[in-house]
Amino acid sequence: MSEIKDVKRLKLLNWLPGFLSALAILFGFLTLFAGFRILFSISDPGYVIFKPLLIYNTFMGFVYAITGWFIWKKPEKGLLMTKFVASLNLIVWIIIAALFGLSEGWIAVESLHAMTFRTVIWLGMFFILKLAKRENPGPKQIC
């Protein structure tokens, strides 16, 4: 019975990186789409835009998509890039949260919520990929 559980677990661990890769690529394209619409005044979100954050997030849309490709094609580098994205988003989130507390309305609560969402998603993706790698390291290389 435990062998069946192990097989199911390995299948799930093999499936997860592909799913997370697609999620990262989709998230990247959606971020780019939303960012460009606001940057080029095609769309108005209805709240105050903190332009440095908008530029950062739009640029990160490219990075998200590239990271998704690496998760799929080169998992080792994909894991490193996911760690980089999660760390960078966490740093920016800390800065935005601090600025939000100090700001007089020039950073919208929606921006803080969106940055929180991005940070949680990428931290989650990193920890899931790290767990998948630890549980299923792949074939051993013979030197």
Image (spheres, rainbow, N blue to C red):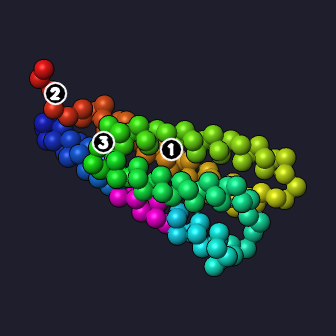
Task: Give the mark, 2 or 3, whose residue is nearer the N terminus.
Answer: 3
Quadrant into which the C terminus falls: top left
Task: Give the mark, 1 or 3, whose residue is nearer the N terminus.
Answer: 3
Q: Which residue is mark 3?
A: 75
Picture coordinates of residue 19, whole percent (x, y): 32, 55
Dot 1 lies on which element?
helix
Q: Residues within 10 Å of mark 2 (few under 14, many from 20)?
A: few
Q: Is residue 111 magenta?
A: no
Tag shown at residue 64: none
Left or right: residue 136 compared with residue 64: left
Q: Main secondary structure of the magenta part?
A: helix
Tag shown at residue 140: 2
Q: Which residues are magenta?
A: 22-30
Q: Which residue is mark 1?
A: 85
Q: Determine which quarter of the picture holds residue 117.
A: bottom right
Give the residue type that dot 2 points to.
Lys
